[in-house]
Amino acid sequence: MATYIGFLRAINLGAKRKFPKAAIVAAVEKAGFTDVETYINTGNVRFDTTLRSRAKIETALEKAFEAEAGFPVPTVVFTQKELVAIADDAASFGHGGKHYVSLLKDAPTAAGIKAVEAVGTADEVARVGGRAVHLLLGENYHEAKLTNAAVEKHLGVATNRNLTVLSALAQRWC
């Protein structure tokens, strides 16, 4: 049995994409996973499974989430070790502004990395490490050009969390 952390993309946005924590837990349990726990209502879920293939885990969760929620829910899964590495990497950046992390479903290509880094400016920097894109931004995140949408344009499906949440999850669940 291994523990994984899943990050759901694009839930609880507007009236039609509501997916409460209790429904997420129910769907994960229906998919056959155990020891399920959520953290805040932004689509963070920890669970245990005997499956070892990340792709199979993501597929099982996405099928269960669509059945429960009634709409597709792209899901990005990491091991505990991977989540800790993402949080630890962030400490080395020494960035004083806003720090968000886009969590990628698939490993990025060299061309994709180059393209997403090119979107950055002196005030907005993307640093790619594995399946995590650290977005080092100025104080006003809502005016940034380097967003999760820009990441997805070049690197595929991603979901975004701020560093505070990822660090809390790493401490709580790993």
Image: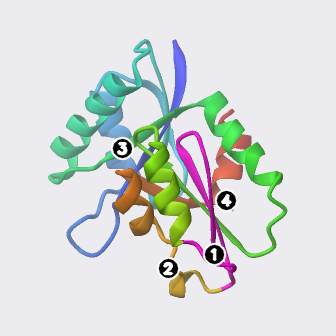
Residue at numbered disc 4: 163
Determine whether label 1 and label 2 are within 8 Å by CB. Answer: yes
- The mark nearer the N terminus, 3 or 2, is 3
Local crowd size for mark 1, using a 10 Å CA cut-off: few (<14), some (14–19), many (≥20) = many
At a point 44% along the width and 15% down the height, the residue shown is 52
Q: Quadrant of residue 165?
A: bottom right
Q: Quadrant of residue 34?
A: top left
Q: Which of 67 and 166 lies nearest the eye of the viewer?
A: 166
Residue at numbered disc 1: 124
Q: Amino acid at mark 1?
A: Glu
Relative to 168, 68 lies left or right: left
- The mark nearer the N terminus, 1 or 3, is 3
In the image, is residue 131 part of the stretch drawn in magenta? yes
Q: Where's residue 77, x and y in %? A: 45, 36
Is the residue 142 above or below the residue 43 in the image?
A: below
Local crowd size for mark 3, using a 10 Å CA cut-off: few (<14), some (14–19), many (≥20) = many
- The mark nearer the N terminus, 4 or 3, is 3
Q: Amino acid at mark 4?
A: Leu
Determine whether label 3 and label 2 are within 8 Å by CB. Answer: no
Badge 2 marks a residue whose secondary structure is loop
Disc number lying in front (3 or 2): 2
At a point 75% along the width and 46% down the height, the residue shown is 89
Which region is colored magenta?
Answer: 120-139
Disc number lying in front (4 or 1): 1
Disc 4 and disc 2: Cα gap in Å? 18 Å
Local crowd size for mark 4, using a 10 Å CA cut-off: few (<14), some (14–19), many (≥20) = many
Mark seen at residue 75: 3
Mark seen at residue 145: 2
Q: Quadrant of residue 84?
A: top right
- The mark nearer the N terminus, 4 or 2, is 2
Q: Amino acid at mark 3?
A: Thr
